[in-house]
Amino acid sequence: MGGHSIVWETITLMPSVDTKTMSFEKAMRIFRKKVENAGIKDRVRELEFYEKPTAKRKRKLKSAIKRQQRERAKEQSYWSDYRKHLKRRK
């Protein structure tokens, strides 16, 4: 038996705009906003080129490390500000 696996992706309907009561420019602006919010543009960019699984793992690991560093820096700045305010009260 082969090790074939089926990948199920969520199917999202293409956003649409009713243009009967508005100008083309306004409809286009609304459509672009709907496409952006649906994440279609990001998904198309993601599928544009093949990314090796190892490269994908490395990219995700880098972003996780970066996210943790940002959170840690934010927390450290909070506590350093907190300590400064405590010293002023005494």
Image: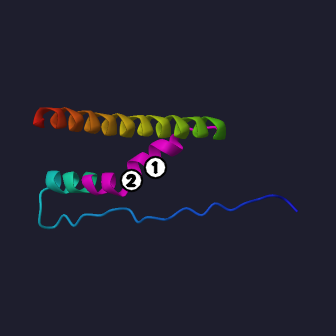
Dominant secondary structure of the magenta stretch? helix
User: Which disc is residue 43 wearing?
Assistant: 1
Residue 43 lies, with reference to residue 73, above or below; the image says below
Q: Is residue 59 magenta?
A: no
Residue 73 lies, with reference to residue 35, above or below; the image says above
Q: Quadrant of the N terminus?
A: bottom right
Name the amino acid, label 2. Answer: Gly
Q: Quadrant of residue 86?
A: top left
Q: Residue at x 37, y 40 (%)?
A: 71
Q: Position of residue 66 (x, y in %)?
A: 44, 34
Residue stretch in magenta: 33-52
Q: Secondary structure at mark 2?
A: loop
Q: Quadrant of residue 34?
A: bottom left
- Residue 50 in sight in this render: no
Q: Position of residue 82 (x, y in %)?
A: 22, 38
Q: Nearer the viewer, residue 71 or 28?
A: 71
User: Which disc is residue 39 wearing?
Assistant: 2
Q: Position of residue 56 (x, y in %)?
A: 58, 39
Crowding at mark 1 (Cα within 10 Å: few <14, some 14-19, many 20+): few
Q: Position of residue 17 (x, y in %)?
A: 24, 64
Q: Nearer the viewer, residue 24 or 4?
A: 4
Name the amino acid, label 1. Answer: Arg
Residue 78 lies, with reference to residue 36, above or below; the image says above
Instruction: Find out whether the residues at labels 1 and 2 contact each other: C-beta distance under 8 Å.
Output: yes
Q: Is residue 36 magenta?
A: yes
Q: How is the image coloured?
A: rainbow
